[in-house]
Image (cartoon, rainbow, N blue to C red):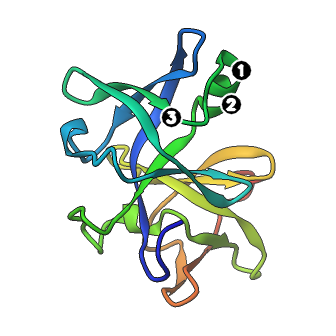
């Protein structure tokens, strides 16, 4: 697990499984696959908690993709459970922009009434409509990230409270 105080940031997204022995195709964002330290674990959130995975094999495919095998993912069934998941790294050792929306990954999202609505699992920089990818009990939803919707930011507890448009999170 990351040391207390260290933050995780999203480095990739699992696009698809590849083959029958647990290989995965990852698409990297804001980081060159060559920069990945394969001796350090990466993390995938399951039930809102970061689960560490060590990389067994890593083969770059072009400028922003790689064929990756994790130590504990050994079958097609295991690999299929990873498809669509975000992959994170401990920011220690990587240069990150603290002010970027990606720094909200892992934070709890609350609505205007203070109810927990989900965990922020990613950031989609859609031109003109940046959105937070929020993992809820029902799956994933995109929530527009606009300063007019932000009510409060609690850095100490890593909680973002927003006015969430009706219908977005059920």
Q: Quadrant for residue 100, please give it.
A: bottom left
Q: Is residue 168 above or below residue 149?
A: above
Relative side of 58 to 46, left or right: left
Residue 104 coordinates in the image, percent (x, y): 46, 68
Residue 4 coordinates in the image, percent (x, y): 49, 81
- Regarding mark 3 in the picture, which secondary structure is present there? strand
Relative side of 126 to 81, left or right: left
- Regarding mark 1 in the picture, which secondary structure is present there? helix
Q: Which residue is mark 3?
A: 70
Q: Earlier in the sequence, mark 3 or mark 2?
A: 3
Residue 114 coordinates in the image, percent (x, y): 74, 82
Q: Which residue is mark 1?
A: 77
Q: Which residue is mark 2?
A: 81
Number of other residues with Cα within 10 Å of mark 3, as a class: few under 14, some 14 to 19, many 20 or more: some
Residue at (47, 62) in percent of width and height: 145
Relative side of 8 to 63, left or right: right
Q: Image quadrant for the N terminus? A: bottom right
Number of other residues with Cα within 10 Å of mark 1, as a class: few under 14, some 14 to 19, many 20 or more: few
Q: Quadrant for residue 84, please give it.
A: top right
Q: Is residue 96 above or below residue 169?
A: below
Q: Nearer the viewer, residue 89 or 134?
A: 89
Distance from the alpha carbon under mark 2 to that under mark 1: 7 Å
Q: Nearer the viewer, residue 100 or 46?
A: 46
- Regarding mark 2 in the picture, which secondary structure is present there? helix
Distance from the alpha carbon under mark 3 to that under mark 2: 13 Å
Front position among marks 3 and 2: 3
CB atoms of marks 3 and 1 within 8 Å: no
CB atoms of marks 3 and 2 within 8 Å: no
Distance from the alpha carbon under mark 3 to that under mark 1: 14 Å
Residue 123 coordinates in the image, percent (x, y): 44, 53
CB atoms of marks 2 and 1 within 8 Å: yes
């Amino acid at each position: 697990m990351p040391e207390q105080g260290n933050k995780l940031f999203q480095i990739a997204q699992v696009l698809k499984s590849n083959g029958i022995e647990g290989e995965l195709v990852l698409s990297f964002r804001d980081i060159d696959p060559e920069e990945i330290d394969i001796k350090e674990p990466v993390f995938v959130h399951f039930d809102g908690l970061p689960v560490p995975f060590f990389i067994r094999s890593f083969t770059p495919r072009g400028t922003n993709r790689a064929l990756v095998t994790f130590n504990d993912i050994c079958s097609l069934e295991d690999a299929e459970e990873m498809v669509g998941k975000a992959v994170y790294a401990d920011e220690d050792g990587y240069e990150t922009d603290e002010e970027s929306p990606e720094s909200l990954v892992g934070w709890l999202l609350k609505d205007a009434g203070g109810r927990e609505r989900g965990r922020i699992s990613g950031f989609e920089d859609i031109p003109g409509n940046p959105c937070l990818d929020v993992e809820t009990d029902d799956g994933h939803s995109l929530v527009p990230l606009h300063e007019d919707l932000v009510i409060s930011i609690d850095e100490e507890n890593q909680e973002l409270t927003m006015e969430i448009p009706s219908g977005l999170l059920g």
